[in-house]
Amino acid sequence: MKIIILKEKLAKGLSIVERITGKNLTLPILNNVLISAEDNSLKLSTTDLELGISYWGLAKVEEKGEITIPVRTLSGFVSLVGEEKVTIESKEKTLYLKGENYKTQIKGLDTKDFPIIPEVVSDKWLEFEAIAFCKGIMQVMDFCALTQVRPELSGLYFSFQKDLAKIAATDSFRLSEKTIALDGITQGLEGPQSFILPKNAAREIVNIFSEHNGKVKFSLSPSQVMIESYIDDTKNPQARLVSRLIEGEYPDYEAVIPKEFKTRVIIPREEFLNQIKIASLFSGRTNEVKLAISPKKGNVLISSQSVDLGETESRIAIAAQGEEVEISFNYKFLAEGLNQIKSDKIIFELNGQDGPGVLKPSDDASYIYVIMPIKAS
């Protein structure tokens, strides 16, 4: 193998693929990157057996071939090279990197031991605007369950229909859902399609594609999903992620979302969030903050108290309708939901002191956040 590639392209590719390596002590090959010289590009691939990532960078290929070497060593070296171009050659199990002022060798392993990263070949696929899709994932992915007792709750639930997609996550204490319009091409989606994607894969989708100014293509199979971006509307992929799916049936989360409300509040988001943070300082071990909402007075009283630290309360003017209610929430769950809403005002819908609360942006109907209250003992 012999190629010449711009350092910038090589460094970018390594930064994308190296994130899932360096964690396996029993299989050293999984800490390596597979470097393949193809027709007019250099392909970099890594895998942790559940997730596979590949990146293609345009290069001058003088001789085809492949080699696998420790990705962190290569990435660290490339990041420190000052020259614009890098010449890469391989002989047997050694990689040679050359420039005007340096010559480096990195020892590798046999490419036959590198796991095969499957390519999803399916007649079911669809396209999304990458930036909008990644923003949607970011709004829900932090609300997956951390426990593996119910593995289906540890991932993100994707539901595709004819003209829209829904992404949801829940840990049983709160629930987040984002709806995204499908404005791209779809094929083979004769009816609703759904799957559960591991949180780690969702995080890597954001890392890889969140700055891609174009569409990404989803290819679906019963056990895997493949996401690809392309180079300037060509048929050549630029980046590809292949992930296993989580087996199991996702709970009917839509049944948890209240269809009606007893109290509806419109409140300034930033001021509400700041007062929640102040109350959290006195919330004690239970993380409890109390809200007393009075539509007649047009305000909400936010309070908390601690036997050891003291107590605090503050009022915020609101626009509200419905019943008066006193309700308690875990301040962390409340603040995390507010942090995912970027509008100046939020809508807060409540159903008594024991029912779930629903947070929504005042100017965006595509996102909801459901939070369960702390029930009075």
Image: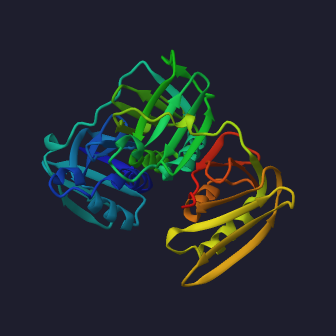
Q: Is residue 65 left or right of residue 222?
A: left
In the picture, the quarter occupied by the N terminus is top left
Nearer to us in this view, 373 or 108: 373
For the point 69% across and 54% down, the residue is 342
The answer to whether any part of residue 230 appears in the image is: no
Q: Is residue 276 left or right of residue 317?
A: left
Write down the quadrant of residue 75 in the picture. Answer: bottom left
Quick check: 125 above or below 77? Answer: above
Write down the quadrant of residue 52 in the picture. Answer: top left
Nearer to us in this view, 306 or 134: 306
Write down the quadrant of residue 153 in the picture. Answer: top left
For the point 36% across and 50% down, the residue is 17
For the point 61% across and 42% down, the residue is 132
- Please state the total of marks drawn on the protein image: 0
Q: Residue furthest front?
A: 377
Question: How far across and how far down the image is residue 147, in percent?
Answer: 36, 52
Q: Is residue 316 left or right of residue 368?
A: right
For the point 40% across and 51% down, the residue is 16
In the picture, the quarter occupied by the C terminus is bottom right
Question: How far across and how far down the image is residue 260, in percent?
Answer: 70, 38
Question: How far across and how far down the image is residue 269, in percent?
Answer: 73, 59
Quick check: 37 above or below 145? Answer: above
Quick check: 55 above or below 87? Answer: above
Nearer to us in this view, 111 or 78: 111
Question: How far across and how far down the image is residue 209, in percent?
Answer: 50, 45
